[in-house]
Amino acid sequence: MFIFGFFVSLWLLCFSLASLFLFGFFVSLWLLCFSLVSLFLFGFFVSLWFLCFSLVSLYLFGFFVSFWLLCIFWVSLFLFGFLCFFLASLYLLGFFVSLWVSLFLFGFFVSLWFLYSLSLLSFLLIFSVL
């Protein structure tokens, strides 16, 4: 009986060690699979988050770049209009100045011609009276 009990207890001990080993093996296998799946899901969600973040940042970057280009376009249009207005006003100013100068010169030469004709008429009248 003692030997039978010894072998039964030895067998139970081996069985329990083997079952503990198998239980530990399957638990560690399960934990390894769970950690791999969780790492895969974590990597998937992290990559998805980075993808969304990069898309949002690209969208915001494109929005601000297009807004900046639009502002530059409007500023350049304003400056171009201001430059055209300035050049047109300079052209009109030059036109009016040249018109004024030509009118002044025309008036000067007309008055000079009148003075010359009056002096010639007065000279002729003086000589005709004499």
Image (cartoon, rainbow, N blue to C red):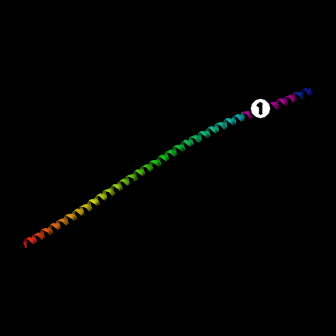
Residue at (12, 70) in percent of width and height = 123
Q: Is residue 13 above or below residue 52?
A: above
Q: Disc 1 designates what residue?
A: 23
In depth, the one of 71 and 121 nearer the eye is 121
Q: How far across and how far down the image is residue 93, in percent? A: 31, 58
Q: Estimate how packed mark 1 is, as few (under 14), some (14 to 19) or many (20 or more) residues with alpha carbons within 10 Å.
A: few
Residue at (69, 36) in percent of width and height = 36
Q: How far across and how far down the image is residue 7, in percent? A: 89, 28
Q: Is residue 63 above or below residue 9?
A: below
Task: Assign the C terminus to one quadrant of the image.
Answer: bottom left
Q: Is residue 22 above or below residue 70?
A: above
Residue at (35, 55) in percent of width and height = 87
Q: How far across and how far down the image is residue 71, in percent? A: 44, 49
Q: Quadrant of residue 86?
A: bottom left
Q: Quadrant of residue 30?
A: top right
Q: Is residue 62 above or below residue 3?
A: below
In depth, the one of 20 and 116 nearer the eye is 116
Residue 10 within the magenta-colored segment of the rendering: yes
Under mark 1, the amino acid is: Phe
In depth, the one of 44 and 116 nearer the eye is 116
**37 horizontally vs 110: left or right:** right
Residue with the most extreme right position: 2
Residue with the most extreme left position: 129
Residue 66 within the magenta-colored segment of the rendering: no
**120 horizontally vs 4: left or right:** left
Mark 1: which secondary structure? helix
**48 horizontally vs 90: left or right:** right
Decide whether the magenta segment is chiefly helix, strand or loop: helix
Task: Assign the N terminus to one quadrant of the image.
Answer: top right
**40 horizontally vs 24: left or right:** left
Q: Which residues are magenta?
A: 8-29
